[in-house]
Every structure is written in C-alpha cells, then in structure tokens.
Image (tube, rainbow, N blue to C red):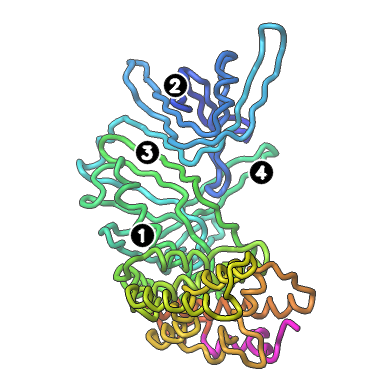
C-alpha cells in the first residue's frame, strides 16, 4: 500500500532552464491515483544549484533509467514544467535540504523494453477521458448468491475519427487501499484503440491523433452540456510503451448528480447527432470561429455576469464568420469609402460647429473623425438577422437579441455589462433569466450550424416550456 506522501517514482534528471543545464537533480514524481487528481513533481537539488534553479519559472527535464546490464530501459520526460514554491531547511552550517515544488504541463514515462507479443507495426492503447454521460457505455451488473458478479455491456459507442483511428469507449476499473484500511474502487472513462495503419509508433500518438480527438470531444461536450477532455494516454507497440499525462488544461469539475435531462441532445439521439455533427464540423473552414463558440458554451463561468459576457462574445464570433464569408462587413469598397471619407471630413471641417483652429474645435473634429469608420460598417443587427435567415434559425420565441420591444434586449444588457455598470438585486434577476435565453439562443445556432434540428434537443419549444425562465421573461427590464 502506497501512501499519498510517498513518491511513485524517483530518478536523477537533467534540468534545462534559461539556456542552462543542471545535471543529476533528484526528482520525486507523485502520479495521481485518479486521473482527475493533480500530478506534482518535487525537485531536490544540491546546495550549489538551488539559487540558480529558483530564478527560473519554467524549465524541462529528461531522465534515463538504466537496467542492471547498463542499457537504457526507461525515460522520464517533461517539456514544460512550472515552479510553484521552493523551501530550504538548514540542519547545520554545511547541511541543508532544499525542495522545489513544480507542476508539469506534460509528463511522459517511456518503457523501452520490447513487447514481443505485439505485432510489428501495431499500436494499441487507450486515451484517458474525464466523465461524459453520453460517451460512457451502459452496463448491466448481476450478482449471484455465490458471490459471483457478472458485467454485461448493453450499449457501447464505437466511432472513427477523421484520421481513420477507430475508438471504442469503455470503462476501466481501478482500486487502491487507503491508509485507514479502506479499499476504494472506481471506474474511469477511456477510448480504446488498436491500430495498424494510422499511428505507426507510440511516439506518434500525440502528433497523429490528439487534434482529431480533441475536436470530437468538443462536439460531444456540446451535446452533453459538460466538458469532456483527454487527460493523457497509455500506448504500446513492439518496441515499448508510453504513459503520457496531459496537464495543460483546466480539468472539468465532475457533476455531483447527473440526470438525462441535463444533456442538450438526448442519449437516444446522440449517436446519430455525433456522426452528422462531426462530419459537418469537418467541412467547415476555418474552424477556429466554431471552436471558440463551442468552448464558450461548454465552459463554466464563476458568475452570471461572466457567463453572459462569454456567451454573447461567442454569438458575435459566429456572426463575424458569417460577415466575412458573405463579404458583409462594409457597405462600400475600400477605394469608394476613401473618397467618401475625405468628403465627410471636408464637410465636418467647414461646418460651423467644428470650424476654426482653436484647441477645442480641433479636439471635436478629431473625436468625430475617429467615429467615421463605423459609418461604413454594416450594423450588427442587420448581419445577425441575415445570419439567422441564411441558417434557418428560429428564435422568435426567445428573448430578443437586438429588437427594442417591451423587454430590454440582450444587446443592451451586454453593453451595460462591458461598460462596467453595476446591477442591483432586481436587475440581477433579469440578468439571470436573460443568460438562460442567451445560452438557448447560442445552442440553437450551433445546432443549426452543425446540421442538427433543434426540435430533437433540449432547446425545442416542447422542452423549454418546463423552464420558468422560458415562461416568465416578457416585459423585463433594467429600469
């Protein structure tokens, strides 16, 4: 039984920091027992290296592990590590003990011993994923009076990424003993693969698979309304194996209680959705606009103000993409607008409200000149309306984005937030309901962009009628 205070591995590493190399630094690695737990490293440099290492915030390490024959059997490697805190204990004049706590952006453990039972050219392994209600398999468990337990897989998703890698989503079961004697067992979501054509070697997993996997997980996260990310992988081929920990991401907080009503796309539709949406996603170029919007709608903000601003920004991102595709950013072409602007500046300078060379008149002219480019820009409400019409997006039952009706528009709320106006308690109630609507609007838009009917989702009129915010929002304002 290993205590959490006990390192998983110890090794002597070469540290690279600030263009300098530090040899034979003792490193203790504390690998997580659960994938979502943090991974930490503790460096124990000798006295002459402590002060120099503490001057550097970022560094890398490389360590080779040799067997009894003297050959290198393993490698520890981390390309980006960040210093967290350093401490030194002095036990006497010439005796001191130093420790530098560090957080790795990535950490790899390579086993270079050959696997004779793995065919040449075959790479097998699994990606480690955070929990997902839609990707996890359904299993039935039966227990006998004899103590026998049988587990049967009822439903399991198998999906092929655009790079040709076929993934099978399943659970792996882990366990450990606690210091008080309790035995803890749990399951974690993985994506298994066995490949002979795409990867080629365990060294190529990241380069050939990670981008495609991340895009797939982003779309499935959108459908689940909860982020699912890859935290690393373990893979092996005939030449050896690698265990890679990926820590350059914010790990999503697990839900305390999951319900089938929490997802945007119901489980019964998910397989059809992910096939259609992933194929549509691959067709869209450039993808960064869509990625940014999907990240925004699946992220978790700390406050309702943060969430509203993030969602509205994603809405503007999607409309901006439409503007540029349809060439509807400007009213006039650059050469036409140049002549028009020159004429406007002459008119302004001659107008009695601006004429003269006093500092005050010059300042007024300058302020008006700076606003002139806005005259050549097609208004955002016009672009938004055209975007919704082009994609057949129905929003007339939701909070108005731009139209000024009896209810304050979402655009007005956004402007007040970004300009720093404080909200009182009653106004916050309006903001909370408006944020719900803004999220539903963005979800309907993204579903349309990805080719899925919102009628088969949790933002259909039928589903939203259960929500108080959907039924009670008209005539709300910020007065």
* Prevailing secondary structure of the magenta residues: loop
Q: Report the residue marked by disc 3.
A: 242
- Seen in the picture, residue 243 relative to 137 is either above or below; the reply is above
The image quadrant that residue 244 belongs to is top left
Q: Is residue 468 magenta-colored? A: yes
Earlier in the chain: of badge 4 and badge 1, it is 1
Quadrant (top left/top right/bottom left/bottom right) for the C terminus? bottom right
Q: Report the residue marked by disc 4.
A: 182
Of residues 89 and 193, the one nearer the viewer is 89
- Seen in the picture, residue 214 relative to 403 is either above or below; the reply is above
Q: Report the residue marked by disc 1.
A: 168
The Cα–Cα distance between marks 4 and 1, rounded to whole angstroms, is 32 Å
Earlier in the chain: of badge 4 and badge 2, it is 2
The residue lying furthest to the top in this view is 94
Secondary structure beneath dot 2 equals: strand
Earlier in the chain: of badge 1 and badge 3, it is 1
């Amino acid at each position: 039984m290993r205590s959490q205070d006990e390192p998983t591995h110890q090794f002597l590493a070469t540290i690279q920091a600030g263009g300098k190399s530090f040899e034979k630094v003792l490193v203790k690695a504390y690998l997580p027992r659960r994938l979502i737990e943090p991974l930490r490293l503790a460096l124990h440099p000798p006295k002459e290296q402590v002060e120099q290492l503490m001057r550097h915030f970022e560094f890398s390490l490389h360590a080779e592990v040799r067997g009894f024959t003297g050959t290198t059997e393993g490698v520890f490697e981390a390309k980006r590590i960040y210093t967290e805190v350093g401490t030194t204990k002095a036990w006497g004049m010439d005796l001191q003990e130093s420790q530098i706590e560090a957080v790795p952006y990535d950490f790899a453990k390579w086993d270079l011993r050959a696997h004779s039972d793995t065919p040449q050219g075959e790479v097998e392994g699994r990606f480690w994923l955070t929990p997902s209600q839609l990707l996890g398999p359904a299993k039935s468990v039966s227990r006998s009076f004899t103590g026998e337990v049988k587990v049967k897989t009822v439903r399991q998703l198998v999906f092929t990424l655009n790079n040709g890698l076929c993934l099978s989503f399943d659970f792996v079961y882990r366990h450990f003993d606690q210091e008080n004697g309790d035995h803890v067992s749990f399951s974690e979501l993985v994506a298994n693969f066995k490949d002979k054509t795409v990867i080629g070697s365990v060294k190529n997993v990241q380069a050939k698979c990670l981008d495609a996997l991340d895009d797939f997980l982003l779309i499935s996260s959108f459908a689940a309304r909860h982020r699912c990310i890859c935290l690393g992988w373990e893979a092996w081929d005939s030449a050896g194996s690698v265990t890679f920990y990926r820590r350059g991401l914010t790990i999503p907080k697990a839900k305390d209680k999951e319900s089938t009503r929490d997802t945007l796309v119901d489980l019964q539709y998910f397989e059809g959705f992910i096939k259609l949406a992933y194929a549509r996603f691959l067709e869209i170029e450039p993808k960064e606009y869509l990625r940014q919007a999907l990240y925004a709608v699946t992220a978790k903000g700390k406050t309702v103000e943060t969430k509203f601003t993030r969602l509205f920004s994603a809405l503007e991102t999607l409309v901006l993409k439409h503007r540029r595709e349809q060439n509807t950013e400007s009213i006039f072409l650059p050469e036409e607008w140049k002549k028009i602007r020159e004429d406007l500046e002459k008119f302004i300078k001659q107008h009695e409200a601006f004429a003269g060379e006093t500092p005050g008149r010059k300042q007024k002219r300058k302020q008006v000149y700076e606003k002139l480019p806005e005259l050549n820009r097609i208004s955002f409400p016009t672009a938004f309306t055209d975007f919704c019409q082009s994609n057949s997006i129905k929003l007339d039952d939701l909070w108005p984005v731009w139209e000024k009706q009896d209810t304050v528009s979402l655009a007005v709320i956004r402007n007040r937030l970004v300009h720093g106006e404080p909200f009182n308690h009653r106004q916050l109630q309006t903001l909370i309901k408006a944020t719900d609507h803004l999220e539903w609007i963005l979800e309907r838009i993204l579903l349309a962009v990805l080719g899925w009917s919102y009628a088969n989702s949790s933002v259909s009129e039928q589903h939203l009628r259960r929500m108080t915010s959907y039924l009670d929002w008209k005539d709300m304002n910020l007065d």
